[in-house]
Amino acid sequence: MKEEIKRINKLVAEGKLSPEDAADLIDAFYNSESEEAVYAGAASTTNGATTGTEEPPKTDEKAYSGESRPRDPFRAIIDTVERLGKEVTENVDWKEVTESARTNAKKGLDALKSGLEEVSKGKFNINWLFSTTTREIRLPITIKEGQTLRVENGSGHVTIMPDTAESYVIARAKFRGATQEDAKAKADAYTLIVEGNDRAVEIKQPHVTGLDVDLEIFVAATPAVEVKSEAGHVTVKDTKNSCRINSTDGRIDLSGLEGQIEVQAYSGDVYLEDSTASNVLIENKAGNISVDKVTGNMNLRSASGNISIRSSSGKTIAVEAVSGDISIDVIEPVTGSMNVRTVNGNAWISIPDGSDARVAVTTLRGLAQTSIELEDRAQNDQRITGRLGAGNGSIDVSAVTGNVSLGLRNSG
């Protein structure tokens, strides 16, 4: 047991298992060994056939030599995880894996061993541990102008787009169960929850284990949209209204929006394009941010990832990256505020001729440069200051470690 715990701890250190997943596996080990001890004790007294003077039956060591020896399911799982890459193991629900392994330990290990053999051949499919079935539901929804569409989804993609004729939702659900009958029972009992009042229409999932649902929502109106997603891509297209997204894991694609746009992402790239916003607020913990053909005030922040703004404009633009490069191309002269910060990364800024702003381009460890002719110019290798026009606005670009550059748009 100590050896298995050491191996699990090593997997955590390598990033192949999270601490929570490791705890689930260790718990499964303890429970499995306790159950084996109980079964062994019960077998020794069955029918009174074994006495204290009888020798236990001998095991044919040759019959179980090498790889042919029956493997404990939990140790087999650890062997498998050690061979898999981090990008694969991060997408596995190890709590469900250990529960399935515990069930298989009681029923027999043939199915589990077969699945592990498939994994060892590179044919990774976690579904060998589960029985699955699918179900598709289409429901009409009534949503009026001025209402908000709120969507909550645990696991699965969410897509929202317009329809000129009617509003409806399609749910493509996948169910995992301990047996095929269990999965089918979950599918038969599944009901998509749709609730509404004067202010909002809400679409969400029931509390069902082993459930993945892809949602496609078509709206005839132009509602404000709010989406909360735990795992899966989120796409909102041409709804012509405000949008708020909270995503734990998955890519976010937004286009054709108007009004207030807010995105809180924890893992996954964020793309926003072809939108006219009053304000854009995007914060991403781990992933890139890309903004293309967007008009509006912008506040973009990324802890780990690059930030790109192309063919866009805004009176106020604030961009901050802790670890990542920043690239900005604005199509209108800067007369307001542009504040760009990167801790570890490079920054490239392109502005059109005719800007009216005070300019400061600074780096602590790197090179600062600009090809623009500035009034009142002062310069050294790491800092350039000056003025464009009357200097009513401000352009402030800085890096701690990285090069910073300011140039004219389309100047080559």
Image (spheres, rainbow, N blue to C red):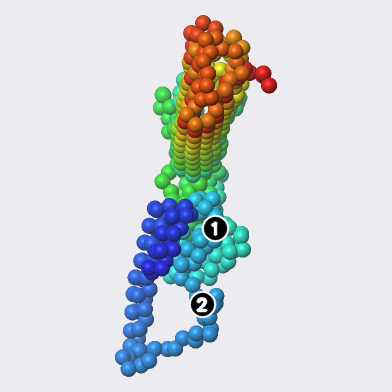
Q: Where does the image place residue 4, in percent across and percent down from the top left?
A: 42, 66
Q: Residue furthest bottom?
A: 53
Above or below, 117 relative to 93? below
Above or below, 354 relative to 1? above
Above or below, 24 relative to 174? below
Secondary structure of the residue carrying numbered label 2: loop
Residue annotated with mark 1 = 84
Q: Where does the image place residue 240, in percent across and percent down from the top left?
A: 55, 21
Q: Amino acid at mark 2?
A: Arg
What residue lies at 43% left-to-right and 48% top-to-bottom? 208
Q: Nearer the viewer, residue 327 or 72?
A: 327
Judge whether residue 315 can be spotted in this image: no
Q: Residue furthest front?
A: 380
What residue lies at 47% left-to-right and 63% top-to-bottom? 78
Secondary structure of the residue carrying numbered label 1: loop
C-alpha separation, residue under disc 2 versus residue under disc 1: 23 Å
Disc 2 to disc 1: CB gap under 8 Å: no
Above or below, 368 relative to 186? above
Q: Amino acid at mark 1?
A: Leu
Q: Where does the image place residue 103, in percent across and percent down from the top left?
A: 44, 65
Image quarter of the C terminus: top right
What residue lies at 41% left-to-right and 24% top-to-bottom? 199
What residue lies at 53% left-to-right and 70% top-to-bottom? 110
Residue 69: give its label: 2
- The mark nearer the N terminus, 2 or 1, is 2
Indicate which label's residue lies in the foreground, 2 or 1: 1
Q: Where does the image place residue 332, in percent across and percent down from the top left?
A: 58, 14
Q: Residue furthest left?
A: 52
Image quarter of the N terminus: bottom left
Q: Quadrant of residue 34?
A: bottom left
Dot 2, crowdedness within 10 Å: few (<14), some or many (≥20)?
few
